[in-house]
Image (cartoon, helix red, strand yellow):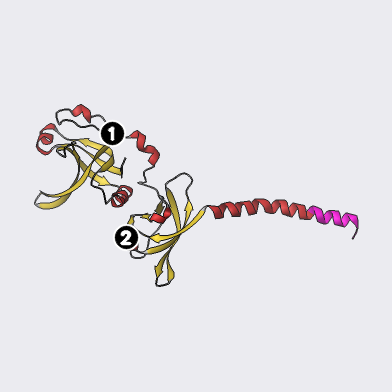
Amino acid sequence: MSSRKILFSLTVLTICLVALIPAVAFAQSAQSQIKEFEGVVKTAVGNYMYVPQAQGLDIYIAGDIPGSIESLIGKEVRVKASLLPDKANLILAESIEVKEGTGYTQVYTRTAEPDFAGYFDPHLRDEYQALNITSLNKPEEWEGKEKIKVYGKLETSKVKEGGQEKEVKHIVILDNKGKELARIIVNNITDYASFYLKKLRLFDRFWFYVNVTGQVDKKVRTRTKEILSGDVVFCCLF
């Protein structure tokens, strides 16, 4: 083979190798973004699932699970999930298999893009001001605030309205001696907040993050101890 042909062959080979390097690097990077783990589903609400073996990460499922996501609770699963760079505490399920006997049956493969409406980014916690309620006669302690966090417990009761019975939820605020100080009317609880309520089922009290929607009139406040109403968007132990 002439030196010219050898040189041409070496040049082509070099070009091919250079072109291949980015593709290999991309493949390795994509592979490193996929995590696989096995464990028992402890909690599942809406699009969110909790498996302890996921090491503190919540699993987001973009789509439907046959029989509902709640049907996975208590079952051993094998999950492949991809990382979400802009959501440090979430991973996106790509596939889910349920253990049956000695093998696994696939019940979910992601076919849709995630919709994170209602997701609460932990970085937003600093926007919520902690309430320190000392008296119902001090409305300045809560009035004018749009984003609050309050330590208390969730209570569900039934009331009659227009001859019909309906459920009403309150966040009950207690003093250090366990005496009730005030109540916050809960209009709505997001799926993500409900998911965390389930995760915190072993605890009676925790911090509720609330978007305030209204104030309670003084006359009603005196009778019911209700000070305001709002939507619960997150809850945690701190």
Q: Residue furthest right?
A: 2
Say few, some or many: other residues with alpha carbon within 10 Å of mark 1 (under 14 / 14 to 19 / 20 or more): some
Q: Quadrant of the N terminus?
A: bottom right
Q: State the separation of the CA atoms marked 1 and 2.
A: 33 Å
Q: Is residue 140 left or right of residue 122?
A: left
Q: Position of residue 107 (x, y in %)?
A: 41, 66
Q: Quick one: label 1 or label 2, which is nearer the N terminus? A: 2
Which label was assigned to residue 130? 1
Say few, some or many: other residues with alpha carbon within 10 Å of mark 2 (under 14 / 14 to 19 / 20 or more): some
Tell me, yes or no, if residue 61 can be seen here. no
Please tell me whether mark 1 or mark 2 is closer to you in this view. Answer: 1
Q: Is residue 149 left or right of residue 223?
A: right
Q: Is residue 104 above or below residue 20?
A: below
Q: Nearer the viewer, residue 119 or 90?
A: 90
Which label was assigned to residue 70? 2
Q: Residue at x 72, y 51 (%)?
A: 18
What residue type is disc 2 on? Glu
